[in-house]
Image: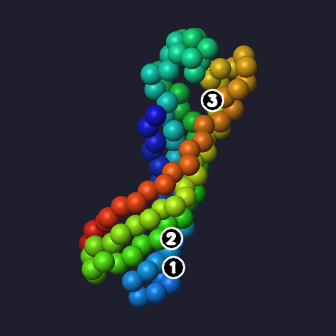
């Protein structure tokens, strides 16, 4: 699975070194290598299955220095509606979802 997405965020400063961020992303989920697999009931597909994608998330940043930040993203949810060809007989793949958690360090320029 590959995701191509445009992401927008709004940052709210809650203290001199702490900020909260809300994110919204829109894009495509590209599901490749699924031809003749259990995902398609072993039916053949022609290339990559592409599906629209929506992502929402929240995170908090802490400024360790003016340029180095620590980030915690306790929740992000990603949704793509199912594509025709994903186990059509059983209708049991109606969507692809993901819930993410991330901890990281970043550098602001």
> Which is more toward the observer, 58 or 86?
58
Q: Does residue 105 sit above or below 48 in this rendering?
A: below
Residue linked to disc 1: 12
Relative placement, left or right, of 72 versus 63 is: right
Q: Is residue 15 visible?
A: yes
Of callouts 1 and 3, the N-terminal one: 1
Picture mark count: 3
Residue furthest toward the right? 90
Q: Position of residue 28 (x, y in %)?
A: 52, 41
Relative placement, left or right, of 70 versus 35 is: left
Q: Position of residue 20 (x, y in %)?
A: 50, 74
Tell me the element at label 1. strand
Q: Is residue 8 visible?
A: no
Q: Quadrant of residue 92?
A: top right
Residue furthest toward the bottom? 16
- Label 1 – label 3 distance at C-alpha: 37 Å
- Residues at badges 2 and 1 in contact (C-beta under 8 Å)? yes
Of callouts 3 and 2, the N-terminal one: 2
- Label 3 – label 2 distance at C-alpha: 31 Å
How many residues crowd around disc 1 within 10 Å: few (fewer than 14), some, or many (20 or more)? few
Residue drawn at (52%, 12%), measured in percent from left and top?
Answer: 36
Q: Which mark is residue 83?
A: 3
Q: Position of residue 60 (x, y in %)?
A: 47, 71
How many residues crowd around disc 2 within 10 Å: few (fewer than 14), some, or many (20 or more)? some
Q: Quadrant of residue 80?
A: top right
Residue linked to disc 2: 21
Relative placement, left or right, of 101 versus 67 is: right
């Amino acid at each position: 699975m590959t995701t191509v997405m445009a992401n927008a965020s709004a940052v709210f400063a809650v203290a001199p070194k702490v900020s909260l961020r809300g994110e919204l992303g829109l894009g495509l989920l590209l599901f490749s290598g699924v031809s003749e697999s259990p995902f398609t009931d072993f039916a053949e597909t022609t290339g990559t299955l592409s599906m629209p994608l929506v992502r929402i998330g929240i995170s908090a940043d802490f400024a360790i220095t003016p340029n180095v930040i620590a980030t915690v993203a306790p929740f992000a949810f990603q949704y793509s509606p199912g594509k025709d060809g994903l186990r059509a007989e059983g209708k049991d793949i109606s969507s692809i979802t993901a819930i993410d958690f991330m901890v990281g360090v970043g550098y602001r320029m």
